[in-house]
Image: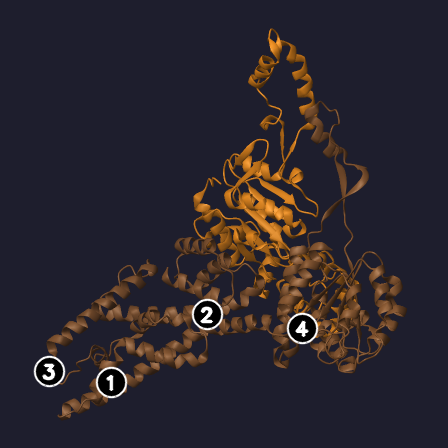
Chain colours: A orange, B brown
Amino acid sequence: MIIKHQEKIASPEIIQSQYEALGYICSNSVATAIYLACHLQKPILIEGPPGVGKTELAKITAAYLNAPLIRMQCYEGLDESKALYEWKYGKQLLYTQVLKEQLGDVLRGARGLDESIARLHDFGDIFYSQDFLEPRPLLQALQSQDGAVLLVDEIDKADQEFEAFLLELLSDYQVSIPEIGTIKAVSTPIVMLTSNNTRELGDALKRRCLHLYIPFPDAALENRILATQVEGLDSQLREQIVVLIGKLRDMPLKKSPAVSETIDWARALLLLNVEELDPLWVKKTLNLLLKFQDDIELVEPEITALLKSLR
Amino acid sequence: MRFVADFIGALREAGLPVSPAESLDALKAIKLLGLESRETSKTVLALTLVKRQSDQVIYEELFDLYFTSVEKAKATDEAKEVDEFGTEPAGNALEPQNEQTDASTNESDTHSLDTSEADKSDGAQANASSALGQALSKEQDMSLAIAQAAVAEKLSSIVLFTQKNHFAYKIMQRLGDEALSIEIRAEANSLELKKMQRELTKSRARLLDQVKDYVEQQYMIFARHKGLKYRVDYLQQVKLSQLDRLDYKLMQSLVQRAARKLASQHSRRRLTRKRGQLDVRKTIAANAAFDGALFHTRWKATRIERPKIVAICDVSGSVSRVARFLLLFLYSLQDVMPKVRSFVFASDMIEVTELFELQGIELALEEIMKRWGGSSTDYGKALVGFQSQALASIDKKTTVIMLGDARNNQGDGRIDIWEKVFRKSKRVLWLNPEHRNSWDTGDSIMSEYLPWCGSVEPCRNLKDIERIFSRLLKYS
C-alpha cells in the first residue's frame, strides 16, 4: 500500500513507541512483524490464545497508517460469494429486460440468422462485467485506492477450501473471477490473518505469511498495558493484579484469563473502589476473570492462599 | 548472508520445513534490519522461518547454539583486524554481513603469504617449515581456518557421535597436520630445533583441542536432530510386534503425528445433496442470464453423517503390541472419527470405550495391557460376548475393525456371529498382524472368517496402519 508517511514505519522502535502512544503496548517482536509486513509486503499470520490483542493489533495498525480497516470474520461455510464478490442479480435481470427492448433496434434490417447473430456479438455484452459486480471484503481491499488493512479474522474457523482460495490473494494480491478474469490490487493492502489454532492451518498458507505468535504478556508488559488502559488505578493494586493473574495462568484452567479479561477486571475493581485485593472482593468479581464454572470452583478455595502469597 | 543460509540448513536438518521462498523472505528481512542485534535477528528469523508453534523450541535452541558460535568467530575476527591494522575497523558496525567475506579473503591472503614466507625463510633459522607450524608459532588465530577446513570436509553431514573423531582427524589433515607431524618427529640435531619441536607439539595439542571443540559444537547443531530422524524413519518400518519397550514413547508421538496428518487431510467432510430443498438465492443467481426463467435449479447441500466405528482388538500375546498402537491411532483420530466404540478381548469381550474417556489414552492403554493382555485367546467366547453387548447397536453406518491373528487354540470360532456382524454393518475390516504366508498355519483359522470380511489386510507396522486408515477415511 501507499504509506503516506514513510517515517512512520522507519524502524521497529518507532512503531513500538508510536503504538504505545496510541494505547497499544506491544513487544519488540510484534513491532518487528509490523515493520516487516510493511516493507516486504507480506501478510502476517497472528496466532495466540484468545484475548491477547490479535484483532486489536489490526485495528491499531489501520488507525496508525490512516488506512481503512476492512474486516472479514470467518466461519464455517464461508464461501467466495460472501468473501470476494457477488453478482447484482436484480440489476442483471433489469439489464436483460432493457436488452430485450433494444433488441428490435439492434436487429432491424438484418438479413438472415447469421447476420443477426453477428450483430448480436458486436453488441457490447456487459452482463458479466464490473458494473454488476458487488464487491465483498476481499475485493474491496484490493480495489481500495490508497490501500487498506485487511483483517481476516479467525481463519481457522473457515473451511480448508476457503484457505486454498485465499492463497492467490496472499501471494500475488490478485483474485480470479471466472467471468471477468484476474483482478489485481490497485494498491497492495496490508493483510493480517488471525487464528486461535482450533485447527492446524495448511503449510501452503503458512508459507506465504510471516508468522507472529503473541503469547500472554509477561508481568512487566501487562503492568504497562494496564497502566495505559485503566487510568487512575493505584500502582500497588496494579502490581497485585498482575501477579495474581500470572499465578492464575499457571493453574490448570480450562481457559486462562487473557489480557482483555485482566483489563475488564481492573476496570471493575476501579469502579467498585477497591483499594486492596481482599478475598471477599476477589470472590465476588471472579466471574469477570474466569468464564467456566469449573474454573471458578477450582480457584475459589485457593483465593486466600493466593492472596497471602502476594504480600 | 552466509550464516543465515547455513542456519537454514541446520533448521532443515532438525526437521523444520523451510521452503526456498521462506529463505528468501528471511534474507530480505535481514537485509532490512541487519544482524547486529541478536534479539532482533532472533525475532526476524522466527517471523519468517518458523511457522509452527511446536517448532519454536528447536528453533530457539539452534539459534542460540548457532549464533553464539558465529558471534565468537566475529569477535576474534574483529580483534585480529584491530591487531593487524592498528586502526579502527572502518565501517564494521555498519556492514556486518560483508565483514565475514572480507575477513575470509583476508585470511586466505595471509595463508598464501605464509606459504611464500615459508619458502623464503626455509632453513635460515630454527623456524617451523610447514605452513601450519608457521601459523602456530606465530600464534595466529586458527578458528576461521578450522571453519573453512570443516566446510571443505562437509562437517555438516555428520550424523553419529562416533564420527566426531574421524572428522576432527580429517580437519587436522586439511589444515596441514601431516607436514607438521613430520616436522615434529624429524630428527633434531640442534638444541634450538629441539626446543622448537617441543613448542610445536604443545601448540599442535592446543589446535587439536580447538578442532575437537569445534566439531563437538557443530555436532550439537547439525546431528542431534538428524539422529532422531534416522530413528523415526526406522520406527515407521519396523514390525510393531518387535518394537522395543524403550521406543514406545517415541513411537506414540509418531503415531499421534501420523494420525493428526490424516485427521487434517480428512477433516473436510464431503457434501451431499439433500433432495427437495431449493436454494433460492443460488437458483436466482444461476438463472439471471435466462431472464429469470428458472432453467437450472440449485439445491441446498447438507453434511453427511460421519462414520461410526467399532474396533475390536485381540490383546493376547503377540497381537497386544500392535493393538496398542492401533488403539492409539484410532483415538488420535477423534477429530474425524468421533464415534468410536472399542472392545478388547482375550477370552472375554470387554468394552473399553469408557476407560479411555475416564483415564486418557496412555494410562488406559497401560491398564488394558496389564489387566487383559497376555492371556490365551478364545475367539468363540469373545464373539459370543460381543453379540450380547454390541451386536444390536451395529447398523448400516458402522464400520467394524477387527485386529487379531485368528489363532483360536483349536476352539470353535463361532463364524456364525461374525457373519451376522458382517451382514448388519456397513463394512468389516480385518487387520492381521501376521504376514499373509502364515495365515492358516498352525491354529490360525483366518480363512474361516475370510468370507465375512469386506477386506483383510496384514497390519504389521506404522506405515500399514496409516495406509489402512487413510483409505478408510477416504471411502467411508
Task: Give the residue number, with chain letter if any, for mark 4.
Answer: B437
- Chain letter for the residue marked with disc 4 in the picture: B
Badge 2 element: helix
Residue at position x 63%, y 27% in the image = A132
> In whole angstroms, how far apart are the C-alphas of marks 2 and 3?
47 Å
Q: Position of residue A1 (x, y in %)?
A: 49, 41
Badge 3 element: loop
The nearer-to-camera label among 2 and 3 is: 3
The nearer-to-camera label among 1 and 3 is: 1
Tell me the tag on residue B64: 2
Under mark 1, the amino acid is Ser
Q: Earlier in the sequence, mark 3 or mark 4?
A: 3
Query: What is the crowding at mark 4: few (fewer than 14 residues within 10 Å), some, or many (at least 20)?
Result: few
Question: Is residue A46 or residue B163 the one in the foreground?
Answer: B163
| Residue closest to the far top | A109
Task: Give the residue number, with chain letter if any, for mark 3.
Answer: B123
Task: Give the residue number, with chain letter if any, for mark 1.
Answer: B181
Under mark 3, the amino acid is Gly
Under mark 2, the amino acid is Asp
Q: Is residue A168 above or below residue A229?
A: above
> In whole angstroms, how far apart are the C-alphas of marks 4 and 1?
62 Å
Q: Is residue B185 above or below residue A69?
A: below
> In whole angstroms, how far apart are the C-alphas of marks 1 and 3?
18 Å
- Chain letter for the residue marked with disc 1 in the picture: B
